[in-house]
Amino acid sequence: MSVSSPATVGIADAKSRRKAMIRRITVTAILTAMAFILMYLEVPLPFMPPFLKFDFSEIPVLVGAFALGPVWGIVIELFKNLIHLPFTATAGIGELSNFITGSIFVGFSGLVYLKLHTRKGAAVAMAIGTLTLAVIAVPINAFITLPLYGSVMNFSTEAIVGMSAKINPLIKDKMTLLFFAFVPFNLFKGIVVSVFTFFIYKPVSKLIHRTREITRGVKDGAEAEAKQA
């Protein structure tokens, strides 16, 4: 039975940590690129204001949150929107809103998945993430997004309500805009992204679990490697 010296364990630990960080950066870069591309596959939704368009960019971000953890999911969300910023048509307001709401969704989903590492656990995590998104997005849109459109783009809430009322007669003022446009939109977005992610979970689960093993089991892997040396 061999006994590893602290120096050997330390070297192995450093090598393992470096390997884990390279893995994180590589996976983050790939998923960010995928999310950025998917941002351009926008789909207008019936009975929704024209400025609310659905895309599938949260799918790779959510996979990243499951594979690397909620913080890295938020990092991917940030990079996705920063890359899209030079092409913005909303003075960056749309990207800011997308970052905040996306971070809520993948952040809470990833946080729950930390405790439930199964397909069923992923479904529970995404359900919680979707509901959290729908609830928290209401004050965010009320006190951040809509006022910014008015102050930065001179696009008042009243104008947005008027535009939206032509599509959805249930929208009559700011409050009905929030509850009959933003809430159903975010629920739809969370549900659709969750369904697609759920069905691709099995094919990508090996990547998720392997990445989690490498990036979260650094110390154990380093000690095992040192003992084999």
Image: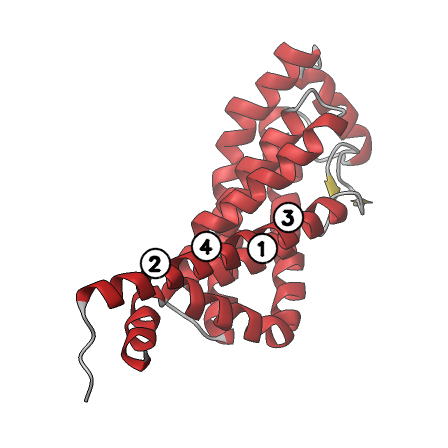
The percent position of residue 225, horizontal first and vertical second, equals 34, 75
Q: Earlier in the sequence, mark 2 or mark 4?
A: 2
Q: Give me the C-alpha separation between circle 4 and circle 3.
A: 16 Å
Amino acid type shown at disc 1: Thr
In this rendering, would 98 be left or right of 111?
right
Q: Nearer the viewer, residue 119 or 64?
A: 64
46 vs 14: above or below: above
**Residue at which label 2 appears:** 14
Residue 218 seen from this side:
yes
**Residue at which label 3 appears:** 32
The percent position of residue 52, horizontal first and vertical second, equals 73, 37
In this rendering, would 11 be left or right of 203?
left
Q: Earlier in the sequence, mark 3 or mark 1?
A: 1
Mark 3 touches mark 1? (CB < 8 Å): no
Image quadrant holding the N terminus, namely: bottom left
Q: Give me the C-alpha separation between circle 2 and circle 3.
A: 27 Å
Per the image, label 2 sits on a secondary structure element best described as helix
The tally of labels here is: 4
5 vs 37: above or below: below
Viewer-nearest of discs 2 and 4: 2
Amino acid type shown at disc 3: Thr
Q: Earlier in the sequence, mark 2 or mark 3?
A: 2
